[in-house]
Image (cartoon, helix red, strand yellow):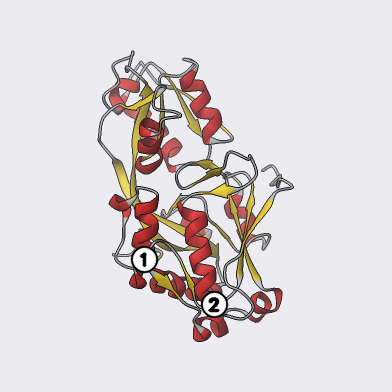
Amino acid sequence: MKKLMVSALALTLLAGCGDKKDSTAGSTGTVTFDQALHDSLPQAVRDRGYIRFVTDASYAPMESFAADGRTIIGFEPDLADAIGQVLGIKVQIVTGPFQTALDKVADGTYEGVLSAMTDTAEREKKADFVDYFAAGSTIIVQRGNPHEIADLTNLCGNVVAIEKGTIQADLLHRSQSGCGDRPMEINEYTTNADALLQLRTGRAVAVLNDFPAATYLTTDTRTSNYYELASAAQYEPGLIGIPFAKGNSQLRDAVKGALDRVISTGAYTDLLQRWNLGSGAVKAASINSATQD
């Protein structure tokens, strides 16, 4: 597997200051420094003073580059900021390929992935997930839906573009069995932006994204002229989380505690509203929900 090529850009979110004063996240919800949670962090993290997460910043409104082409913005960077405020440390987000992110967490390059990664039983073989958001997959087509795509069966016999390594790619490959002698041509790309370019230029009839990202594309004024939803259907809904390396339960549990604090204070709700993501709200953070009964 190819090595993770990290960009020179590493966005450091100031997630808690050295004097540990109270901070706020969102418009009304308030998060404050928690000494007990800070003390529960691994000693190496406390000594270093920051947590390192990797992301593929091509998935608005979860994470994307701002107009300056450098700053990473979105729901998940804001959530990372709030987590850091509770823990009293910085959260550093670095860009890198989605496909190798779990491997780079396993080898210690990063503490976790913050990139709208869905918790699945297969992924839990490599990492422990702290889940904080719910979403399913949906189909994006060109504005006007020229190929009259309504569901997955309509993709048979057509070219579909998808980001490599995603649950949407897995869904498409599993759906091939229903296509008979008219299989899909599934073309996989390094980033979601690359896949969307294929759709926008007519070289693919559809792209699959998580519902929040798809809705954003089809309603934002900068992209709504190019894309629309094939339908409101969400396929295989699940939970999105932050994966941590197996054996790093101390950090995993500290971050879960911070997430629970962000949720209970109302800051989580404020952030969801800021990014128009209220439909994906969860009542509490959870661990490895894909394999829970």
Q: Looking at the image, which is closer to me, 30 or 269?
A: 30
Q: Looking at the image, which is closer to me, 125 or 61?
A: 61
- Judged left or right of residue 47, residue 87 is left
At label 2, which amino acid type do we have? Gln
Find residue 23 and report its horizontal and vertical position in percent.
50, 72
Image quarter of residue 167: top left
Image quarter of residue 219: top left
Dot 2: few (<14), some (14–19), or many (≥20) neighbours within 10 Å? few
Q: Which element carries disc 2, helix, strand or loop?
A: helix
- 118, above or below 156, in the image: below
Residue at 57% over, 45% down? 56
Q: Looking at the image, which is closer to me, 229 or 237?
A: 229
Find residue 162 and report its horizontal and vertical position in percent.
48, 31
- 199, above or below 128, in the image: above
Quarter containing the C terminus: bottom left
Regarding residue 223, the answer to whether it shows in the image is yes
Question: Nearer the N terminus, badge 1 or badge 2?
Answer: 1
Q: Which element carries disc 1, helix, strand or loop?
A: loop
Q: Looking at the image, which is closer to me, 113 or 8?
A: 8
According to the image, label 1 marks what residue?
Answer: 28
Find residue 49 and report its horizontal and vertical position in percent.
67, 73
Task: Tell me, for residue 127, which label it has, or none.
Answer: none
Marks 1 and 2: which is nearer the front?
Answer: 1
| Farthest front residue in view | 27
Dot 1: few (<14), some (14–19), or many (≥20) neighbours within 10 Å? few
- 6, above or below 197, in the image: below
Residue at 66% over, 43% down? 1
Q: How many marks?
A: 2
Regarding residue 289, the answer to whether it shows in the image is no
Task: Tell me, for residue 250, which label it has, or none.
Answer: 2
At label 1, which amino acid type do we have? Thr
Residue at 45% over, 36% down? 169
